[in-house]
Image (cartoon, helix red, strand yellow):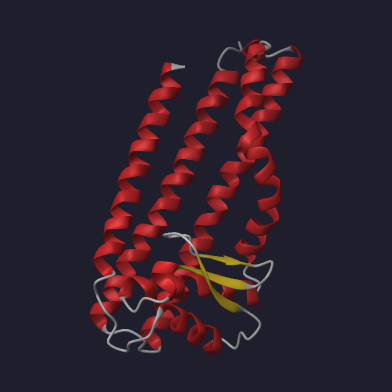
Amino acid sequence: MMGYYILIGAIALVSWLVSSKLKSKFKFYSKVHLQNGMSGAEIAEKMLADHGIRDVKVVSTPGMLTDHYNPKNKTVNLSEGVYNQRNAAAAAVSAHEVGHAVQHAQAYEWLGMRSKLVPIVSVTSSMSMWVVFGGLALGAAAGVGLGYWVAIAGLVMMGLATLFSFVTLPVEYDASNRALAWLKNKNVVTPEEYKGSEDALKWAARTYLVAAIGSLATLVYWGLQVFGGRD
C-alpha cells in the first residue's frame, strides 16, 4: 500500500501545481482587457452565430472555472468571472466552450464517444477502487477463485475511467484549437490578447493531461497488484 500512497501523493502534487499555475494564468490574463470591449457572453454568441449555430443558448453559471458545454440542453455555461468580463481569459474560455458546441453541431467523433462513456463512467468510477479492494481481500493475487474475477471486474471499471480520461484529451485540445483559430481569423482579439488566450488554454489542457496520466498510473498499479502474485 505504501507504493500506492506515494503514487497518489505524486499525482496529487503535480495536479495541484498545474491547477495553481492555471489559476495564476487566468488571474494574470484577466487583467489583459480586450480592445473590442466584448464580454465573454458576447464573444460566445458571436462565435455561435459565425458557425451558423442558432439552437444553443449562452447562460451564466455560479462558481470559478465552472465553464462547460451541456450537449443535453444545448447550453454554453459560462462562470460569473467569464460571462460578464471583457478580458483575454474570458475570451479564451468562452470561445473554448463554444468550440464544444461546434463539435456537437458537426458530430465530432471523439465528442460522441465521450458522451457515450459519460453515463457508464459516472456509475463505475466511484465503485472501481472498492471492487478491486474486495477482490484482493478475497485472494485475487493468487489468480484463482471468486476474488480474482471480482478484482478483474474492478480493473475493467477502472479501465473505462482511464479510457474516458484519454478520450477527453482530443475533445479538449480540438475545442481549444477551434477557439483559437476563430479568435485569430475573425480578428476578435489583438496579437497580444491572442497570446494570452493561447497560453491560458494550454494550461487548461494540461490539467486534463495530468488527470489522464494519473488515471493510467493508478490502473497500472492496481493491475500489478492483481496480476503480480501470479506464477
In this view, the residue in front, 81 or 88, is 81
Q: Nearer the viewer, residue 18 or 36?
A: 36
Horizontally, residue 109 falls left or right of residue 219, namely right
Q: Quadrant of residue 64?
A: bottom left
Outermost residue toward the right? 146
Residue at point 72%, 22% (across, down):
150
What is the quadrant of the C terminus in the image?
Answer: top right
The vertical placement of 230 against 194, above or below, is above
Q: Is residue 52 left or right of residue 97?
A: right
Q: Nearer the viewer, residue 15 or 166?
A: 15
Residue at 36 percent across and 76 percent down: it is 85
Compared to residue 228, the image places residue 122 above or below, namely below
Residue 205 in percent (x, y) is at 41, 58
| 126 up-or-down from 44: above or below | above
Q: Position of residue 97 (x, y in %)?
A: 50, 70
Q: Residue at x 70, y 56 (%)?
A: 116
Q: Position of residue 99 (x, y in %)?
A: 51, 73
Q: Quadrant of residue 194?
A: bottom left
Residue pictured at 55% horizontal, 74% vertical: 59
**Rendered position, 34 above or below 156:** below
